[in-house]
Image: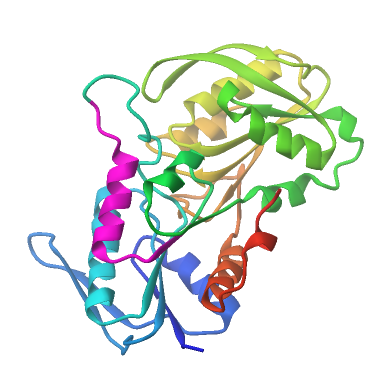
Amino acid sequence: MEQYKIFSGTANQALAREVANHLQIALGKITIKKFADNEIFVQIQENVRGKDVFLIQPTCNPGNYNLVELLIITDALRRASARRITLVVPYYGYARQDRKDRPHVPISAKLMANLMIAAGAHRLLTMDLHSDQIQGFFDIPVDNLFAASIFIENFSKVKDPKNWVVVSPDAGGIVRARFYAQRIGCQIAFIDKRRKEANVSEVMNVVGEVKNKKAILVDDIVDTAGTLCNAASAIKKSGAIEVFSCCTHAVLSGNAIDKIEKSVIKEMYVTDTIPLRKKSSKIKVLSVANMFAQAIYHIHIEKPLGELFLE
């Protein structure tokens, strides 16, 4: 069995260290620095010839920099003769640009896939892709993990599930909301909204019964938090007792954290696929390190990942 190595870019070294700790191995030694003109320099500081290599790097903000860093490290590993390179991208940036929804626009999620493959990736390991079709953008194997089990564990022991309701912030997330509701044992609802422009949404009404219930808003990505906070407000106005939230990727751009602090949301659970920019009394971070560690080991020993997926 070939030895395996784990390397990390600069985007989320805390998660990478935790993954390595779960696997009881040290992170690979690598030099990453910027020249005066901000060009990225990378040098792998140990032998990876013939090794099974895993590179952990989400393409979160600053997305363009982290993406280029990912590509350059991948190229360095390929040229150092790594046997197989698995890109572990906990948060896949540009995932929301996955189709042509208007004239003369790119499908940037596909472009990202092309770049990763061109750089030398043999496999992608990620979590909660914004849309399943992105897996088809790759001509290499893609493993898409789900954070649902981590969130559901927080709510699985709730008393009187009939007094709870899982809410999707839009119609597109109903399947996700239904899955959570089935596992928790409660009902579902969703927000009927219309988006005027990118990052701006208008909540219309709540579809489903939320009155006198504790609500859980579930989503995969929270960016500016406008949709989330408006949805929470609409749920509260519709008679909900309390509003909780959970999302996998806490992008939280601009003043999103301040919005959440001022919102009616009681608690918000997020994962560490993206480092939290600043602390918040309402935001609780749950680690996905153990799940990624298990997936990495399964891939290395060629064991199916089925047990890590939720049906």
- Residue 177, quarter of the rendered image: top right
Whole-percent x, y for residue 147 in the image: 62, 51
Whole-percent x, y for residue 221 in the image: 50, 39
At a point 39% along the width and 38% down the height, the residue shown is 253
Whole-percent x, y for residue 161 in the image: 87, 35
Viewed as shown, does residue 267 lie left or right of 94?
Answer: right
Figure coloring: rainbow
- Residue 281, quarter of the rendered image: top right
Count the labels in the image. Answer: 0
- Relative vertical location of residue 174 with respect to residue 58 in this rendering, above or below: above
Numbered range of the magenta stretch: 105-125
At a point 68% along the width and 27% down the height, the residue shown is 167
Viewed as shown, does residue 29 lie left or right of 230?
Answer: left
Whole-percent x, y for residue 188 in the image: 75, 26
At a point 28% along the width and 68% down the height, the residue shown is 74
- Relative vertical location of residue 169 with respect to residue 121 in this rendering, above or below: above
Residue 170 visible from this viewpoint: no
Viewed as shown, does residue 280 lie left or right of 98?
Answer: right
- Relative vertical location of residue 29 with respect to residue 104 in this rendering, above or below: below
- Residue 116, quarter of the rendered image: bottom left
Answer whether residue 209 is magenta in the image: no
Residue 296 visible from this viewpoint: yes
Viewed as shown, does residue 67 lie left or right of 254?
Answer: left
- Relative vertical location of residue 307 with respect to residue 186 in this rendering, above or below: below
